[in-house]
């Protein structure tokens, strides 16, 4: 561990303590009942920290093997992150079956789009495959999550502040990871001496901030919401086209209003 | 700065702005989320005031004022006409928003929604918004002449009658659907 900068060791220790606090709150406040996958995600983060601590103490921070092993430890927490975020979205939209179905399609469309981009750019630069895949994952994650949150806002669906904090945190961390990965590539190609440390610090500081925000949010219980009564399935089929045709009519009024002004001699 | 880094920075800034917007507390109007009853509230649809607007902006009045009145009065009248046109636009937007609220409430409370219908509505909303902003800015800054509303009167009068009847009907039907659903469910209806 001697090769690990002291500042990074301190940050790492703080991060582990905060993760333990989150796990403690998840258990004592019984959030694990409603958010089992999120609880697993936090537990996995702690396991990853322990694994990396072992790896760095055995092989050194800068060794090639340690780097390979640290990349290998990434897929599991990343999968857990995606599942935890999906679980949160499902909690928000569970009473709104139609919107949840729409959200799923949106996630799939955003995912396909960004994964295509990520795989195309990874093929162009094979040396940076892992980093580009990681960036692609975080970009997909952030885009899909934000699309769903926009959908939630568009339909004015109420979101508990705890869920808002957790979803917002996931998104901020993924955005930071996208910037950090792009910065790593730029600094490396520019022969910046401590490129790897800058990358690590950026990700660690942002993630620490996110986890502190989660700790604060998880101190509160999640409000129990009444299940709204859904309309019969035929109501949407009858009302929606009619509303759309009225909206089109109003749009036409505005369009003619515009033409009357612009085309006026 | 490397161009890739710059592009990703821009994307991330845009994503964070969208995130902040999506997570901020909803405004007062948005809080009336599932208020289906508001759609059929007793007020007349604003499109029905078109005849009055037409009268207020008659070009004959302006000609008369230019010939017989003072320049000051003509200016004041022009300003008033602009204000009336802007108010009318704002009321058209209110009608649009009300319909949109109904559509969102129906979609949110439906067990299945059609992507095509929702996408069409999103497109109509965007189209209405940019057109509304263009016209409003144009009239406000005097870049566009105050509309010759008489040319539209026939079309809008027709629409006004249809709109008045259909919005009332849609609201009643939506409220009835909620009532039926809640009586089947046996729970209180969470639509207010």
Image: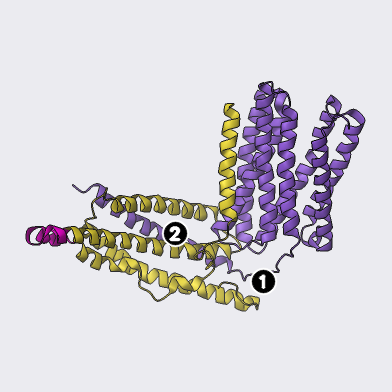
Chain colours: A purple, B yellow
Query: Badge 2 is on which residue?
Result: A244
Judging from the image, mark 1 belongs to the subunit labelled: A
Horizontal arrangement in the rendering, residue B116 relative to residue A96 (left or right): left
Query: Badge 1 is on which residue?
Result: A226
Judging from the image, mark 2 belongs to the subunit labelled: A
Q: Which marked residue is nearer to the observer: mark 1 or mark 2?
A: 1
Residue B70 highlighted magenta (yes or no): yes
Q: Is residue B134 above or below residue A220?
A: above
Q: Which residue is located at x 67 percent, y 44 percent?
A: A141
Instruction: Tell me whether circle 1 and circle 2 mark residues in contact (CB < 8 Å).
Output: no
Q: Quadrant of residue B45?
A: bottom left
Residue A155 highlighted magenta (yes or no): no
Q: Quadrant of residue A39?
A: bottom right
| Residue A98, horizontal then vertical, whole percent | 60, 59
Q: Is residue B62 above or below residue B43?
A: above
Q: For the residue carrying disc 2, how many other residues have a C-alpha within 10 Å: few (<14), some (14-19), or many (20+)? A: many
Magenta stretch in the rendered image: B58-74
| Residue A227, horizontal then vertical, whole percent | 66, 70
Compare marks 1 and 2 and give the one earlier in the sequence: 1
| Callout 1 and callout 2 share a chain | yes
Q: Is residue A33 above or below residue A185?
A: below
């Amino acid at each position: 561990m001697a090769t690990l900068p002291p500042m990074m060791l301190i940050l790492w220790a703080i991060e582990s303590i905060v993760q333990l606090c989150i796990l403690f709150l998840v258990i004592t406040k019984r959030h694990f009942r409603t958010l089992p996958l999120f609880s697993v995600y936090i537990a996995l983060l702690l396991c990853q920290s322990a694994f990396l601590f072992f790896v760095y103490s055995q092989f050194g921070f800068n060794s090639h093997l340690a780097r390979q092993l640290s990349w290998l430890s990434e897929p599991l927490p990343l999968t857990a992150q995606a599942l935890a975020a999906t679980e949160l979205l499902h909690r928000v939209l569970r009473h709104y079956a139609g919107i949840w179905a729409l959200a799923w399609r949106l996630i799939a469309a955003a995912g396909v789009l960004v994964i295509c981009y990520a795989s195309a750019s990874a093929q162009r630069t094979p040396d940076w495959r892992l980093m580009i895949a990681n960036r692609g994952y975080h970009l997909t994650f952030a885009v899909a999550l934000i699309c769903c949150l926009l959908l939630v806002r568009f339909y004015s669906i109420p979101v508990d502040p705890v869920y808002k904090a957790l979803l917002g945190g996931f998104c901020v961390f993924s955005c930071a990871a996208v910037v950090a990965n792009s910065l790593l590539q730029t600094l490396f190609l520019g022969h910046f001496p401590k490129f790897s440390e800058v990358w690590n610090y950026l990700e660690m500081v942002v993630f620490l901030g996110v986890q502190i925000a989660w700790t604060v949010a998880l101190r509160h219980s999640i409000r129990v919401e009444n299940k709204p009564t859904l309309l019969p399935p035929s109501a949407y089929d009858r009302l929606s086209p009619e509303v759309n045709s009225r909206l089109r009519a109003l749009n036409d009024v505005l369009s003619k209003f515009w033409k009357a002004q612009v085309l006026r001699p | 700065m490397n161009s890739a880094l710059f592009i990703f920075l821009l994307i991330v800034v845009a994503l964070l702005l969208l995130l902040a917007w999506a997570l901020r507390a909803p405004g007062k109007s948005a809080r009336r989320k599932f208020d289906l009853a508001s759609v059929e509230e007793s007020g007349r649809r604003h499109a029905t005031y078109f005849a009055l607007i037409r009268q207020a902006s008659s070009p004959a009045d302006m000609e008369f004022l230019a010939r017989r009145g003072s320049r000051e009065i003509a200016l004041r009248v022009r300003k008033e006409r602009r204000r009336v046109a802007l108010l009318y636009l704002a009321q058209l937007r209110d009608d649009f928003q009300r319909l949109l609220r109904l559509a969102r409430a129906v979609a949110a409370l439906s067990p299945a929604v059609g992507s095509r219908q929702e996408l069409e509505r999103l497109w109509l909303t965007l189209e209405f918004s940019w057109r509304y902003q263009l016209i409003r800015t144009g009239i406000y800054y005097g870049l566009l002449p105050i509309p010759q509303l008489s040319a539209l009167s026939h079309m809008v009068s027709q629409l006004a009658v249809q709109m008045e009847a259909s919005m009332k009907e849609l609201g009643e039907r939506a409220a009835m659907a909620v009532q039926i659903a809640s009586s089947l469910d046996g729970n209180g209806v969470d639509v207010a």
